[in-house]
Amino acid sequence: MSQNHDCGGDVRVDDPEQFPPREDGYQRLWTPQRMSYVLRGSADDGAAKKPKNTECPFCAGPRKSDEDGLIAWRGTHVFAIMNLYPYNCGHLMICPYRHVSFLTDLTDDELFEFEKASALAMDVMKTVSHPDGWNLGINQGEVAGAGVATHLHQHIVPRWNGDSNFMPIVAQTRTMPILLHEQREAYAAAFEKLAPSHGLPLEGAPTQDHEEDED
């Protein structure tokens, strides 16, 4: 609205339909902390580039402490690790120690424990956070969407009824009600309690290096 303030002048009321249109009806929630993930170590000119550390994160994780590596459970052939950038709260992955790309690369013993550990992880989540459902998935190869295509991993994502909201769509942000280290601790305790009932070990070798399969 604009007004003519000259003495004795008429007051002019602008037609709202003549105002410049708003870009959209959304407010903005700024999340600059996401840039460290989006750019993954940007170049000086701001262009995104690959991370400087090219070591496979699923090979590096088991060589760290459980806390530093976000390891929730260590088996004989596979381990459970929290996702650093979770799709949903409590998202973890089952990985073989061996650096292999495809499900078909696993030995019979590895494949058996891989699937048994996935079922164990579901029971752990059921005990800790009572989800209403799960997404289980393996992306095989970069073309299929695998973030780390050279090291096999199965995503296990808990879901709850009514737990969707506008944040991921509008703000490109996921709301996480619990910190990763606290979620890992809760999962680790449940893994230790439930592993024997699945015929799985309480804990594998914590820092053992496993040979890579180059074939």
Image (tube, helix red, strand yellow):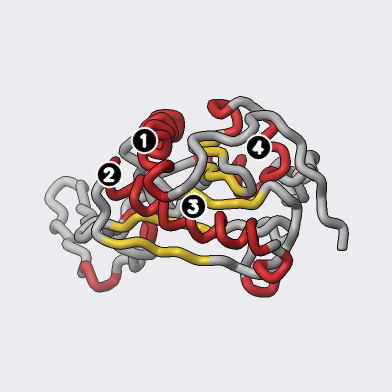
Mark 1 and mark 4: span between their CA atoms?
Answer: 22 Å
Residue under label 2: 127
Identify the mark nearer the N-term, 4 or 2: 4
Discs 1, 4 touching: Cβ within 8 Å: no
- Dot 1: few (<14), some (14–19), or many (≥20) neighbours within 10 Å? few
Determine the residue positioned at 60% across, 48% down: 78
Tag 3 and tag 4, C-beta contact below 8 Å: no
C-alpha span from label 3 to label 4: 17 Å
Between disc 3 and disc 2, whose residue precedes?
A: 3
Going by the numbered disc 3, the residue's amino acid type is: Ala
Type of the residue with mark 2: Thr
Badge 4: residue crowd in 10 Å (few <14, some 14–19, many ≥20): some
User: Percent x, y for residue 171?
Assistant: 39, 53
Q: Which residue is mark 3?
A: 117
- Which amino acid, by three-letter code, is at mark 1? Lys
Q: Nearer the viewer, mark 3 or mark 2?
A: 3
Q: Residues within 10 Å of mark 3 (few under 14, many from 20)?
A: many
Say which residue label 1 marks: 193
Gap between marks 3 and 2 measured at Cα: 15 Å
Residue 196 is situated, as x and y percent measured from the top left of the image, at 42, 42
* Mark 1 in CB contact with mark 2 (< 8 angstroms): yes
Would you name the residue on which mark 4 appears?
Answer: 61
Residue 25: quarter of image:
bottom left
Q: Looking at the image, which is closer to me, 97 or 36?
A: 97
What residue sits 54% from the left and 36% below the top?
71
Kindly report the distance in space between the C-alpha atoms of the residues bearing marks 4 and 2.
25 Å
Q: Earlier in the sequence, mark 1 or mark 2?
A: 2
The residue located at (34%, 54%) in the rendering is 167
Q: Alpha carbon of mark 1 to alpha carbon of mark 2: how far?
A: 10 Å
Secondary structure under badge 4? helix
